[in-house]
């Protein structure tokens, strides 16, 4: 008579609860890591956008100064970005230091957060555009552009 194999009631079929929990833990850690990377990527993207806007602003005022070299001293100013939009910019006006500063200040208002600083200083024929703002993390950032007329 052939021998019959006895079946044990304790044979495993499928995963145990511990294996499932460990797998879920590994997946959760992976998903949290991906979310953190995405958040940091967005943060760095915002910083890069802000720096490109500041670069544009500095070159814009430098071009305005070069167009109006005779009145370049009139562009020297210290400016704090207000909470409300500044008025008085006329994009169709000719080359005029007062109007150029008003238009530039409007651009600064749209590009930088309130209470940011935008300063234009002169030392002979060397002009410096200094822009300072506070980022999302509360860190004050400063960028200076120096150029010669």
Image (tube, rainbow, N blue to C red):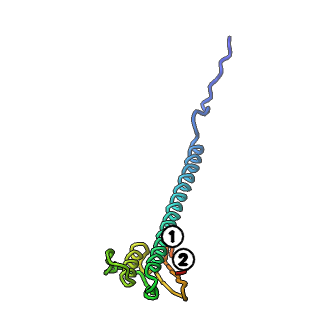
> Does 9 sit above or below residue 134?
above
Q: Is residue 78 visible?
A: no
> Badge 1, how many Cα within 10 Å: few under 14, some, many 20+?
some
Check whether the beta carbons of the residues at disc 2 and disc 1 lie within 8 A of each other: yes
What residue would you read off at disc 2? Answer: 143
Residue at (50, 71) in percent of width and height: 55
Q: Nearer the viewer, residue 77 or 18?
A: 77
Q: CA distance from mark 2 to mark 1?
A: 9 Å
Q: Is residue 21 above or below residue 84?
A: above
Which x, y percent locates residue 9?
Answer: 60, 30
Q: Quadrant of the N terminus?
A: top right
Q: What residue is rendered at 57% in x and 50% in y? A: 25
Residue 101 seen in the current view: yes
Q: Position of residue 6 (x, y in %)?
A: 64, 23
Judging depth in this view, the residue of 115 and 50 nearest the camera is 50
Q: Is residue 140 above or below residue 5?
A: below
Residue linked to disc 1? 51
User: Which residue occupies 34% across, 80% down?
Assistant: 86
Which residue occupies 47% across, 79% down?
A: 66
Mark 2: few/some/many CA within 10 Å (<14, 14-19, 20+): some
User: Callout 2: helix, strand or loop?
Assistant: strand
Q: Foreground: 22 or 36?
A: 36
Q: Position of residue 136 (x, y in %)?
A: 48, 72
- Mark sitting earlier along the chain (2/1): 1
């Amino acid at each position: 008579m052939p021998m019959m194999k006895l079946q044990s009631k304790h044979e495993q079929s499928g995963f145990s609860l511990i294996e499932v929990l460990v797998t879920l833990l590994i997946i959760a850690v992976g998903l949290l890591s991906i979310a953190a990377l995405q958040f940091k990527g967005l943060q760095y993207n915002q910083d890069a956008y802000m720096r490109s806007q500041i670069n544009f602003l500095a070159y814009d005022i430098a071009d305005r100064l070069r167009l109006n070299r005779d009145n370049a001293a009139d562009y020297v100013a210290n400016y704090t970005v207000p909470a409300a939009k500044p008025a008085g910019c006329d994009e169709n006006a000719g080359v005029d230091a007062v109007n150029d500063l008003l238009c530039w200040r409007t651009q600064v208002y749209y590009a930088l957060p309130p209470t940011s600083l935008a300063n234009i200083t002169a030392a002979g024929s060397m002009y410096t555009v200094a822009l300072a703002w506070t980022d999302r993390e509360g860190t004050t950032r400063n960028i200076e552009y120096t150029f010669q007329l």
